[in-house]
Amino acid sequence: MSIETLVCPLPEHTLPRTGVVEARSLPRHGDDPRPAWPRSILVASDASPASNAAITVARLFAERSGASVEMTAVYSPRIPLPACPERRGFDQCEAPERGEAAALLRAVRKQRRSIPEARAWPLRLEVGDPGSVIVRLASAAATDLVVLGLGELNPDERRYAGHTAWCVARYLRVPVYAAAPDCEVPTRCVVALPDGQVHAPTLRAAVACLPAGAKVWIALPSPSASGQSGDKFKSARELADSACGPELANRLDALELARIDVVGDMLAGVLGLVRDVNAQLVAVPNRGDPGPMRSFLANLAEPLLLAVRCSVLVVPDESVAR
């Protein structure tokens, strides 16, 4: 169906295209007998520059792991419609919405065509709240990873891109990769463990995102301040081994690991560490069941999504990241 013949309510579109995949990417792990992670990726685009970063990340993961990728564009209708004496009747009210939705789809198609590796990805147009639509699609398709743009660190960008990211992270059961502008393969990563407990899904997902030679700082509350089991492990490698197990030992051998004990406020400490080491990625757990309860736990996911300058990988408890 062409854009010009779209009618309201808008149908779902799956528009496969052909293309050639040839891209710089994360290294393959041919010696790992387990299936690569992720295997299925959902990338959200609104045709903005922030979405270019999301497409870049999805492309890198897809080439590395052979994952399937689906794109979605979500049009958020204006509800209620603005009062206007000229608008009488259903058709007159809905026509402007149909035109704007069609314009969004055209823009995302153009964005996809500009990236050769993305031309083969199916594209779906949805109507509704972006956060709830992305959560629904990811759950229905058993997606392993959701990728979206984070936007620039300014009030206008983060009000929309950042808000959508933390809404999605609050309700999803799979990891969310919020890509910062001009993102690249991360070689400097901070893994934040705000409650002082090892979170295996977060460490595994972070390792899967990093190439050989990458530097990783594992940040925990200072044992003297937290009273938790943070002093149970003597080194960053022991922390990583406890989470990743012997099957990922080869990958850990290729990384430079360091442990950082944060004294005082954990959010301020992580933000300072990210700035000091010029981190390109922050990996952080999202404890608890999906929903508002996550905001009452010792989670830094939502504050980091709104305040940090680099990409953020949010990993829930139930993740099966490898």
Image (cartoon, helix red, strand yellow):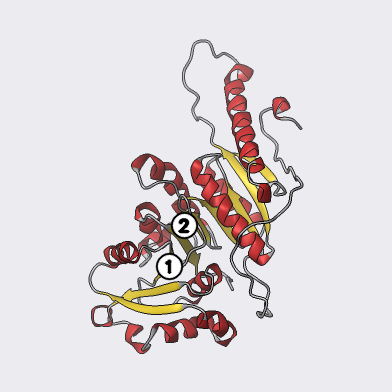
The vertical placement of 51 against 64, above or below, is: above
Q: Is residue 322 left or right of residue 297?
A: right
* Nearer to the camera, 165 or 213: 213
Residue of label 2? 170
Asked which secondary structure carries label 2, the reply is helix
- Mark 1 neighbour density, 10 Å: few (under 14) some (14–19) many (20 or more): many
The vertical placement of 198 against 89, above or below, is: below
Name the kind of residue labelled 1 in the image. Answer: Arg
- Look at 60% across and 56% down and name the residue there: 58
Q: Residue 188 shows which numbered tag?
A: 1
Residue 117: % across, % down: 67, 51
Q: Earlier in the sequence, mark 2 or mark 1?
A: 2
The quadrant of the picture occupied by the N terminus is: top right
Residue 177 in sight? yes
Q: Residue 167 shows which numbered tag?
A: none
- Look at 47% across and 67% down and name the residue there: 187
Residue 137: % across, % down: 63, 51
